Image: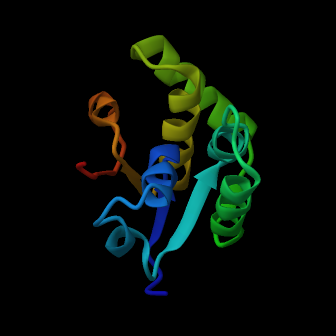
Amino acid sequence: MNGEKILADTNVFINLAEGKEGIEPHLQGKEIFVSAITEIELLGYYQITEAEKNYFKLLLNDCSILELTDAIKQRAIDLKQKHRIKLPDAIIAATAQFLKVGFVTFDKGFSNIPNLDLILLEF
C-alpha cells in the first residue's frame, strides 16, 4: 500500500461486480474504507444471490468498515439540513468528511457537497 486512504461508495462495488472497466486503478494499493451503510446496502440488496453475497463479503473483508459514530451522525444531520440528499448518501458523505479522505463514487450528486475530496468515476 502507498498509504493513501479512500472511502468507496456502494456503487463502486456494484460496478466492480458487474465487470465495469477502469475501477481497479482507483482502489489498488490504497487503504479502503467503507461506511457501515455501504455494507448494509451491498449485503441487504433485494434478492441477492449467495454467490453475490460471498463476493461482496470477500471485497468487504479487505476494507475497514466505519460504524456510525456521534461525529458522523452530526455531520450527516448538517448535510441533510443544508443539501437535498438522501439519508444513506448523507451518512456516507459525512463518513468521508470525518475521515478526511478521498471519496470514490460514480454518483455525480455528491459534487454538490462541500468539503468532500471527490474522485468521480464515469461509466
**The residue positioned farthest toward the left in the image shown:** 122
Q: Residue at x 43, y 86 (%)?
A: 2
- Which quadrant holds residue 23? bottom left
Q: Nearer the viewer, residue 22 or 36?
A: 22
Q: Residue at x 76, y 53 (%)?
A: 50
Q: Residue at x 35, y 41 (%)?
A: 115
Q: Nearer the viewer, residue 34 or 14?
A: 14
Across and down, in percent, residue 56 comes to 65, 58
Above-or-below relation of 116 to 110: below
Across and down, in percent, residue 95 comes to 57, 44
- Which quadrant holds residue 111? top left
Query: Is 78 left or right of 83, judged from the image as shown?
Result: right
Across and down, in percent, residue 46 comes to 68, 31
Q: How many marks?
A: 0
Render colour scheme: rainbow
Query: Is 76 left or right of 53, judged from the image as shown?
Result: left
Across and down, in percent, residue 63 comes to 64, 67
Q: Residue at x 28, y 28 (%)?
A: 112
